[in-house]
Amino acid sequence: MSDARNRVLMCRPDYFTIDYVINPWMTDHSEPLDLDRAIAQWTTLRDTIGEYADVVTIEPQPGLPDMVFTANAGVVLGNKAIASHFIPHERRPEEPHFKAWFKDNGFELLALDDEIGFEGAGDCLNDRGGEWLWAGHGFRTEVEAHDEIARFFDREVVPLRLVEDRFYHIDTCFCPLSGGYLMYHPPAFDFDTRTEIESRVPLKKRIVVDTYDARRFACNAVNIGDRVIMNKASKPLKQALADKDFELIEVDVTEFLKAGGSTKCLTLNLTEPPVGEQAA
């Protein structure tokens, strides 16, 4: 049995604030951000993930409050990485820090055209049962990025068109799980996309997330083996996951929901495919 563990990238929320609006969630919260509480919640999440994976960190930077959402640093497959080029100008100053981190840590980095919007593992997810990548478009990633992703990773890319602005990245409404399972919120996607998902993922492998859970970021979950780490789940969703033999771990990250992100947004899996799912 191998002792290898997945590696996960996180960034401390030392400079986390909500000073601008780049998604609908940033205007919806009724209470101001509590930074001390956010740091405590982040620390609990880091320690929880650390029980099952090796957590590494990138240094936070003053004036870059959303660096904490490392899912948007880029996307990784094997020893290759594509760093993000953000659509919102407010996040573009993060780009050199993430690019430097990937290079310093030995990843082969694609020089993505600066004219193409792409927001990393927020909009590009490795399927856990098939040999393809799911890639979003519609809000924060442009469809032109998909060909670049396919060429660089030599992997089929399946486009997913988002139609609901509250679900601005696919990782807010779509979560591939180990064993080829999928947790997702169908209304976030257009008809053709839903048809494509259903053609690739068998009914018995699909876990449909309703609006109640989706708006509490249930799909924005961290999956390590048979464990699913999320902010909160309803009783029906808990049962649906248990029926598929997943262990649900709830970690309160409500301060980060105010900015439009949950547990998955706060992490980037650096081991793709994950340990235990790699070809021999």
Image: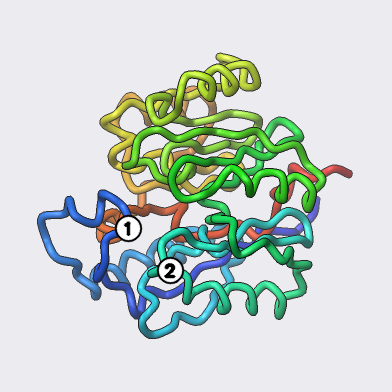
Dividing the picture into quadrants, the one containing residue 268 is bottom right
Say which quadrant the C terminus sits in: top right
In this orientation, which residue lies closer to the viewer: 248 or 183? 183
Helix, strand, or loop for circle 2? helix
Residue 109 to residue 189: above or below: below
Going from the N terminus, do you reach mark 2 or mark 1 first? 1
Q: Amino acid at mark 1?
A: Ile
Please provide percent x and percent y for residue 112. Answer: 68, 62
Residue 132 is left or right of residue 217, and the answer is right
Helix, strand, or loop for circle 1? loop
Residue 239 is left or right of residue 271, and the answer is left
Residue 188 to residue 227: above or below: above
Mark 2 neighbour density, 10 Å: few (under 14) some (14–19) many (20 or more): some
In this orientation, which residue lies closer to the viewer: 228 or 125? 125
Tell me which residue sits at (78%, 67%) in the image.
Answer: 108
Label placed on residue 91? 2
Tell me which residue sits at (44%, 63%) in the image.
Answer: 69
In this orientation, which residue lies closer to the viewer: 5 or 279? 279
Please provide percent x and percent y for residue 252. Answer: 30, 54
Tell me which residue sits at (78%, 53%) in the image.
Answer: 152
Instruction: Tell me the CA gap for discs 2 and 1.
Output: 9 Å
Please provide percent x and percent y for residue 235. Answer: 30, 28
Please provide percent x and percent y for residue 110. Answer: 73, 63
Residue at the limit of the structure toward the left, as seen here: 30
Q: How is this picture coloured?
A: rainbow
Tell me which residue sits at (19%, 70%) in the image.
Answer: 34
Q: Are marks 2 and 1 in contact (CB under 8 Å)?
A: yes
Q: Amino acid at mark 2?
A: Arg
Label placed on residue 22? 1
Label placed on residue 227? none
